[in-house]
Image: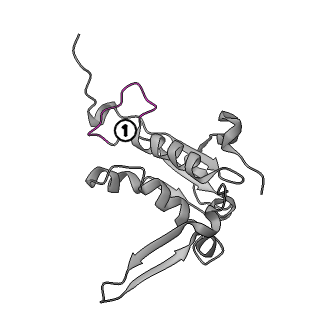
Amino acid sequence: MKTFSATPADIDKKWIIIDAEGVVLGRLASIIATRLRGKHKPTFTPSMDMGDNVIVINADKVQLTGKKRDDKIYYWHTGHPGGIKQRTARQIIEGKFPERVLTKAVQRMLPGNRLSRTLMTNLRVYAGTDHGHEAQAPEVLDVKAMNSKNSRGA
């Protein structure tokens, strides 16, 4: 028996849409990372972009467990001496770009290489319910119904 290795002709990409309202951030990010990578498919090949295109709506209504909303800190550096900056998850979610919390969570669950940068282009995250991808006829993936631990009340 020979090991199957997918070629670009073998890849079948789908469009899926996920509603993030009331879903726990880490659980949602791990499901999205698996879908982007293509690990849910039996023809998974590690060096190929096998995953689906994922659309996430209501990213501003994602839930964080415990005190993470106030205690989780995102750091970045401006490049100047003493230029380290920080914001809490609450400040980012209530700020101008609340979808960045989910985007960063997914990005940090993917391997840090050129392939993961390509995979991140297959992810579209929107803070509200509006998205411009109706023409792709995305399939709905109900993350809340997968496991009772995936959802959490406000």
Place of residue 118 in the rendered image (x, y in percent of width and height, measured from the top left): 33, 54
Give the prevailing secondary structure in the magenta stretch.
loop
Question: Which quarter of the figure is the C terminus placed in?
Answer: bottom right
Element type where label 1 sits in the image: loop
- Residue 121 occupies quadrant: bottom left
Q: Which residue is mark 1?
A: 50
Residue 125 located left or right of residue 64: left
Determine the residue positioned at 73% across, 49% down: 152
Q: Quadrant of residue 148?
A: top right
**Amino acid found under the numbered disc labelled 1:** Met
In which quadrant of the rendered image does the N terminus lie?
Answer: top left
Specify the segment rendered in magenta.
39-48
In magenta segment, residue 131 = no
Task: Look at the picture and state if 75 lies above or below 81.
Answer: above
Taking the spot 62% from the left edge, 40% from the top edge, the residue there is 141
Q: Image check: 3 left or right of 17? A: left
